[in-house]
Amino acid sequence: MTIWPEAQAEHLDTEGFSTVDMTINVGPQHPATHGVFRMVLTVDGELVTSCVPYIGYLHRGLEKLSEANDYRQAMGFWDRTDYLAGLLCEQAYCMAVEKLANIEVPERAEYIRVMLAELSRISSHFMFLGAFGADVGSFGTSFVYAFRERERIYDLFEEVSGDRMFPTYLRPGGVAMDLPENFEKRCREVVGNIYQGLEDLDGLLTGNEIFVERCRRLAPMTTERAINWGVTGPVLRSTGLAWDVRKAEPYSIYPQVKFDIPTGVEGDIFDRFFVRLSEAYQSAKIIEQCLDQIPDGPVLNPGLPKNLRIDNAEAYARIEGSKGEYGVYAMARGGNKAYRMKLRSPSFCNLSALSEMIVGHYVADAVLILGSLDIVLGEVDK
Amino acid sequence: MDGSNLLPFGEAFFGIAWLDAIIRILAVISLVMLVVIYLTYGERKVVARFQQRIGPNRVGPGGLLQGFADTVKLMLKEDLRPANADRWVFALAPFLTFTPVLVVLCALPFARDWGVRNLTLGLFFVNAVMGLNIVGIMMAGLGSGNKYALLGGVRAAAQMISYEIPLVISLISVAMVTQTLDLNAITLLQEDRPFIVLQPLAFLIFFLAMLSELHRAPFDIPVAESEIVGGYFVEYSGMRWSMFQLTEYASMFAFSIFGSVVFLGGWEFPFGGAWGWGWQLALTGIKSLGWIIAIMWVRTTVPRLRVDQLMAFCWKVLLPMSLVQFLMNGFVLVYDWPQELLTVTSGIGAAALIAFVLRRAAHRPKAGSLVGTYKQVRAPAQ
């Protein structure tokens, strides 16, 4: 029952016994792949000797769809890329279109965008923390802890925009409507719960001897390797390089809020976990500052036409997505549709480093390494 | 072996030995079925409490009939056999896994006069037979024609071989003190104090090795859900699959009674002899319930070990510690030193074992001031 006979190699040990490498097909239906990702592992006993990833199961033609729909319609596709942090993707898309058409965004709208984007980032990191705990094998407890907080964040999204996962709330030039009246009170409640949830997960996982033993010094990555692979986001920062688009190339109102960039030391899996945990704290702090500073005013640029038409222009907007640098390249050649839209998805680039990291580790660790990259297949397959 | 050893549980029913045996065995089998049905329900409820969920609450009052509904569902399910499975090996494996557990239950004393048969070599018998279900597990792993199942079966065998040794040595330590292997006699000796007082180290080792034998977290490597999606029973469905579940819960029940007989005073401590059989049965129930809840508690809290860490923990920690316990007992008993010395020496050993496990978890970064302290804490990692 060989699946790929050509992938098998024979080993002859000193006693003259021959063992055959076994090919294991992990995914696309497998609890550890976090979606429809497939990797074919060749294992020698418990050790992985080669790893071939296969992607494309969730390809929906995002870029082509964006060229076939007008600027406002196309936005609905974009929060389905990184579906765990939809508002971050909407923000990147809107920034690209605004750059194309030179649209001003009112300050209040920027604050709303940043608050909701940071909430999305927290929600995405919670997903990672919970799923990673499940990967290490804590029988869903971390998962449920994380989902408790995510539910609250989603409830807030629903109150603001009417939808939980895919709000489609941002517009080129601002946001669709103003915040509900009791938003500040509700948001502070949610942020308070986020601190509590992070502390719970921290106590459950970070302080656990088995968890630390599993993660420490596993698949470490140097800064040079990470840069060569094009790895960004928490995985890059875990190697010690404090590269965060929010600081390196500030956009929106990020210069007006104070936050730190958590970095790791060794670039191992524990560092990746810890950087994300710390980052969620920083995001919560950003939200609190935004709530203090948010001004009154319009939330949508009033001078915009209903049907946006853009002449020859080209723009690249990048933000710090929850998984790394999320870049949108847009090109207009007149008309109400983009001529070309291109997504630089962080998950895709991070995933390219997977094979190198997995080879030589145990099967159990392969699952952890994949989990530590925190990929979202909607973003990988576009 | 004379008749008195075989039939200590009062008069034989109807005065006929074989009829008596059949009646008692049927009673034990129906007890086990009932216990298993409610253990599955209980585990789901307990785990739900740990994870801030509600658990099953639809079938019957408070979900109490959930287990029966599940049983009916499983019986009605199609019994699938993969095309490349080894037919007879595949079909026989679930029953070979379950039978040893049932045999073990026939040798356990539930109260002074309650049980199937009391054996003079009960301690030895329980251990020897309990180990046999690995044959069924290996058969399931090899016969399924599935690579995940194969990995799971081989992992289970490796784990079983390793952890049987500290388990047996910790039980031998108790047997050194009792000078008998008769389970009823061991229980009677604990009238004043349970053996956990005399042998805390042996108790700890027994508990850890038992978790491994039961394939429970953190030693659930053979059935790792996030890695090999269930391990050896991945290809089973319907009744054959439920035989494996039955085995899991029945052996949990058997081990909890066995453990409480050997270490917690079984039906004797406290006041078991004085208050009659009702209290004795209640004692058995309470102790095994506490034991089972402890197992579930561990399961919901800790992640899973990797396979090499599992082996290292067994051979480098548990085995030496169990030998130390063995040696200390030998000295104390040979020189006829007072019994309190057993408590002291074993207590020191148990404290050392706990300290060893907790030692490296002491320097973890804590929540709150994550970014600032992170680097300092992380840097001197060994």
Image (cartoon, coloured by chain):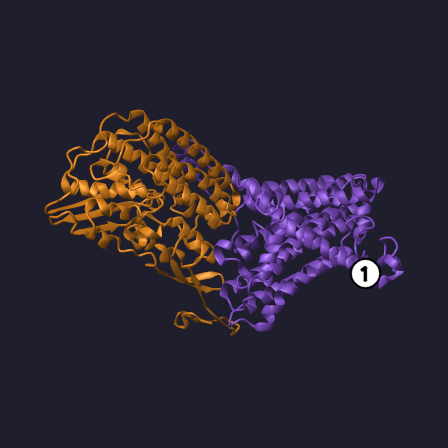
Q: Quadrant of residue B245?
A: bottom right
Residue B168: give x, y in percent of width and height.
69, 55
Q: Residue furthest bottom?
A: A16
The amino acid at mark 1 is Ala
- Tag count in the figure? 1
- Residue occupying the point 20% across, 43% down: A96
- Residue occupying the point 52% across, 37% down: B362
User: Relative to residue B308, is residue B196 depicted above or below?
Assistant: above
- For label 1, the crowd category at 10 Å Cα-Cα, with few meaning under 14, some 14 to 19 and many 20 or more, is some
Q: What residue is disc 1 on?
A: B21
In the picture, which quadrant includes the N terminus of chain B? Answer: bottom right
Front in this rendered view, residue B14 or A1: B14
Q: Quadrant of residue A242?
A: top left
- Asked if one can make out residue A32 in the rendered structure from this viewpoint, the answer is yes
Q: Residue furthest front?
A: B60
* Position of residue A100 in the picture relative to residue A17 (left or right): left
Colour in which chain B is drawn: purple
Chain with orange colouring? A
